[in-house]
Amino acid sequence: MIYSLPVLGYLLGSLSSAVIICRLMGLPDPRSSGSGNPGATNVLRFGNKLAAVLTLIGDLLKGLAPVLVARWLDAGVLIIAATATAAFLGHLFPLFFQFKGGKGVATAFGVYLALDLRLAMALLATWMIIAFASRYSSLAALSAAVLAPVYVYLISHQVAYVVTTTLIAILILWRHQSNIQRLQAGQEDKIHLARKKSARK
C-alpha cells in the first residue's frame, strides 16, 4: 500500500481540474482556447469566476491530498517526497489528458502546504511581498518556487524534500518560459489594484 502512494499521487495529479470543470460547466476546452493552458487563470478568461475558483481549488487539492495521506500513513520521508513529486508530475503531464497539463503553481502550493505549513506560509508571504512590490503575479510565483528549496532546508533539513522542491522549481521555470520572456521584454501583464475614487463635494 505505502509503495503504491507515488503511483496514486500521479494518477490523482493527472485529473485535469480545468478540463473537467469546463466540461461540466459548458465552457470551452482550456487546452485549445485562451492561452491554451489548463489552469485557473485561463479559465477565468472565459468570464466564469466560479469555474476559475473551482479549478484553483481542484489543482491545489491534487498536490495536498496525496501528500497528506502519505504523511498520515507515516510512509517515510522518501515515499512522501516521491508522492509529492509524482502528484506534481501528474498535473504537468496528465495520463488522462494526452499529457498536456498546466504550469503547476497551484498544485505545487498544495504540495508545500502538505509538506509543512510553515513552508507554505513562508512561500505565501514571499509571493505577497514580491507581487505587491512588482505587480507581477508570475514573477512572484517564480520567485517563491525558486526559494522553496531554501526554505524547506532551513525548516526541515530533509534532503529528500529539498530534491523534490528543487525539481518542482526547475519544472515551474520551464513551464513559465513564455512568462519569463514577457517579463524580460516588459510585456507581462501586471496586477491591477482597484482604486477608490475620491468623493467630490
Image (cartoon, rainbow, N blue to C red):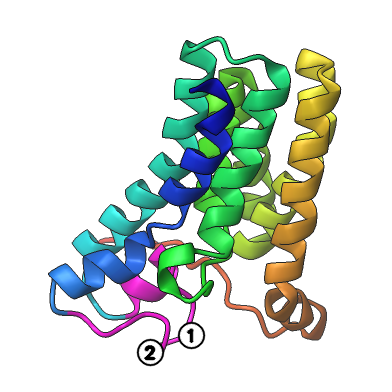
- Helix, strand or loop at disc 1? loop
**Residue at coordinates 34% horizontally, 59% vertically from top-left?**
17
Q: Say whether residue 125 is visible.
A: no
- Helix, strand or loop at disc 2? loop
State yes or no: residue 39 in magenta. yes
- Please state which amino acid type lies under the numbered disc 2: Ser
Q: Percent from the top left, x then y, of residue 196?
A: 34, 59
State yes or no: residue 12 in magenta. no
Q: Which residues are magenta?
A: 27-45
| Dominant secondary structure, magenta | loop
Tell me the tag on residue 71.
none
- Please state which amino acid type lies under the numbered disc 1: Ser
Image quadrant in which you'd find residue 193: bottom left
According to the picture, the residue beneath numbered tag 2 turns out to be 33
**Residue at coordinates 49% horizontally, 64% vertically from top-left?**
94
Q: Percent from the top left, x then y, of residue 79?
A: 65, 25
In terms of depth relative to the viewer, which is nearer, 46 or 27?
27
In terms of depth relative to the viewer, which is nearer, 200 or 107?
107
Q: Percent from the top left, x then y, of residue 123?
A: 65, 36
104 vs 59, left or right, is right
Mark 2: few/some/many CA within 10 Å (<14, 14-19, 20+): some
Mark 1: few/some/many CA within 10 Å (<14, 14-19, 20+): few
Q: Point out the image quarter for the C terminus.
A: bottom left
According to the picture, the residue beneath numbered tag 1 turns out to be 35
Q: Is residue 169 above or below residue 163?
A: below
